[in-house]
Amino acid sequence: MRRLYVKEDYPIAWLVINNPARRNAMSLDMWHRFTELVENLNQDPRVRAIVIRGEGDAGFISGADISEFQTLRKDPQAAKVYEEANATAFRSLRQSTIPTIAMIRGHCLGGGFGIAAACDIRIAAKDAEFGIPAGQLGLGYPTDAVKDVIDLIGAANARDLFFSARKINADEAREMRFVNRVVSGNKIEFETLRYVRLITESAPLTIKAAKAAINASLGQPNTEALRLAEKLADACTESQDYQEGIAAFLEKRKPVFNGK
């Protein structure tokens, strides 16, 4: 089974996450493949819009596949490699010159939230559920991905979601300005396609220039502050709390953190 594939409907390309057994969680191989597919689509002159979606009713993306963490993130060095795969996938969307649209139904959590945040547009079904559960796992979230979230919903709302690890529904995500539109679940494909066709009918060079100007206007965080944030994120992986968070998730119990 292909866990990631592209459905061609030129000038639209649908990038489909297909891992229903894991609620469309992303394995390490999938993170690498995701980046490769986005970069390949950016080289295809037939593509004018990329829509990212989950297969069927399995939801959008429930995050990283945590069942891999005890092997593929077993020590700080391995965790660094894993986190770079995440960051590279987010970056591929951020740097895409082709507009990217997240069509979200069901779970949009953790790394899935990061993928959606790195897209240009987010359209959600009313049954969509959003959250950043890193605090329940002892994980450090990639700093560039944190900035994506802040750029969309502001620092106050970002603090709320990161600190509490709570889940929010589509209406609250719309109020926070994380999603652009909320539609009924049985109409999300129709409404997404109708909207994306507006994009594909616009001048590609105008869109490319507008996206570059918007990204440039967002600017970059202070370099020294960014280095400190990265150092603190790395420290999470070396902590006892990280080990406790992963163990608690796999054992289906509430974690008990000690701040060490």
Image: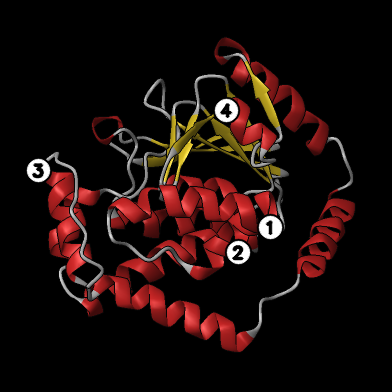
Mark linked to residue 251: 3
Instruction: Please state if 129 lies on the left or on the right of 195 as rendered.
Output: left
Q: Quadrant of residue 235?
A: bottom left
Mark linked to residue 151: 1
* Label 3 Cα neighbours within 10 Å, binned few <14 / some 14-19 / many ≥20: few
- Circles 1 and 2: CB distance less than 8 Å? yes
* Amino acid, disc 1: Asp
- Circles 3 and 4: CB distance less than 8 Å? no
* Amino acid, disc 3: Glu
Q: Residue at x 23, y 76 (%)?
A: 238
Q: Earlier in the sequence, mark 3 or mark 1?
A: 1
Res 41 visible: no
* Amino acid, disc 4: Ala
Figure disc tally = 4
Q: Secondary structure at mark 3?
A: loop
Q: Which residue is mark 4?
A: 170
Image location of residue 118, percent across then percent down: 59, 54
Q: Secondary structure at mark 1?
A: helix
Q: CA distance from mark 1 to mark 4?
A: 18 Å
Q: Secondary structure at mark 4?
A: helix
Res 209 visible: yes
Q: Which residue is mark 2?
A: 147
Instruction: Please state if 73 lies on the left or on the right of 234 as rendered.
Output: left
Image location of residue 141, percent across then percent down: 42, 63
| Residue situated furthest bottom in the rendering | 224
Q: Earlier in the sequence, mark 1 or mark 4?
A: 1
Protein image colouring:
secondary structure
Q: Secondary structure at mark 2?
A: helix
In the picture shown, does residue 246 fall above or below 6? below
In the picture shown, does residue 31 fall above or below 229? above
Q: CA distance from mark 4 to mark 2?
A: 21 Å
